[in-house]
Amino acid sequence: MTQTPAIKPRNAEKTKARILAAAFDLFGEHGYAKTGIRDIATRAEVASSLIARHFGSKANLFEQSLIHGIHTHTLFVDDKPGFGKQMAKMMVSKANPKLTTTIMLAIADPESKAIARKVTREHIMDPLAQWIGPPNAKARAISMLTLMNGFVLQTKYLSGDKAPPAAVEWLAQALQDIVDNR
């Protein structure tokens, strides 16, 4: 008697989540232009046709994977009085540089750059500016993101060492000054 292979139960939400995670990882490793749908399908252990079914185009998959990455990998502290210290501490201990890397690599391609700009504005910049509040909320949000992205880039990729305590203290104070509008 021959046995029929067990059929794996399907779960569309889990499949989409695997595809998004694989896409986010690969876009962060290789950039938009050098990442193919087949590569993503292989990493997610799905057929390429499932990616087309769930996301339509590579551009839409990139957009959705960025949004997924923002919600999965972004650290944030909601406490304004202690924001600087808490955020700096989290960035040193828990920061996942994938989001910063994915956005940086997206700049090299016009299509992914436009998508990254839109997603960053809608899902990071605008909510951050709203949280910061007036005056000059947008300028302060840009300043904050510039500091945080630069710090992650320098400490996680370029320095190769643990961030010196004095640098972490400086970041904490600079972030707090932005929140407090000083």
Image: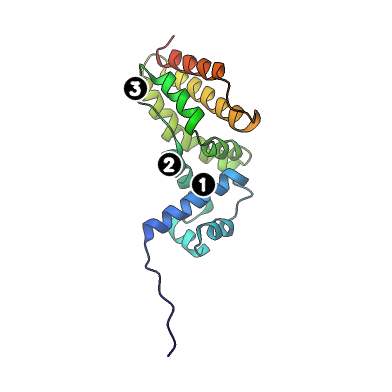
Give, as a three-letter code, the residue at label 3: Asp
Mark before the other along the chain sequence, 2 or 1: 1
Asked where in the image residue 163 lies, by quadrant, the reply is top right
The vertical placement of 70 against 7, above or below, is above
Please say whether residue 31 is visible from this viewpoint: no
Q: Residue furthest top?
A: 182
Give, as a three-letter code, the residue at label 2: Thr
Mark 3, mark 1: which one is toward the viewer?
Answer: 3
Are the two marked residues, 2 and 1, in contact with CB atoms closer than 8 angstroms? yes
**Position of residue 158 measured from the top left corner of the image (x, y, whole percent):** 65, 30
Q: Read off the residue under disc 2.
A: 72
Say few, some or many: other residues with alpha carbon within 10 Å of mark 3 (under 14 / 14 to 19 / 20 or more): few
Are the two marked residues, 3 and 2, in contact with CB atoms closer than 8 angstroms? no
**Position of residue 80 measured from the top left corner of the image (x, y, whole percent):** 35, 19
Give, as a three-letter code, the residue at label 1: Phe
In whole angstroms, how far apart are the C-alphas of marks 2 and 1?
A: 10 Å
Q: Read off the residue under disc 3.
A: 79
111 on left or right of 19: right
In whole angstroms, how far apart are the C-alphas of marks 3 and 1?
A: 29 Å
Q: Which element type, helix, strand or loop, lies under badge 3?
A: loop
The vertical placement of 84 against 182, above or below, is below
Mark before the other along the chain sequence, 3 or 2: 2
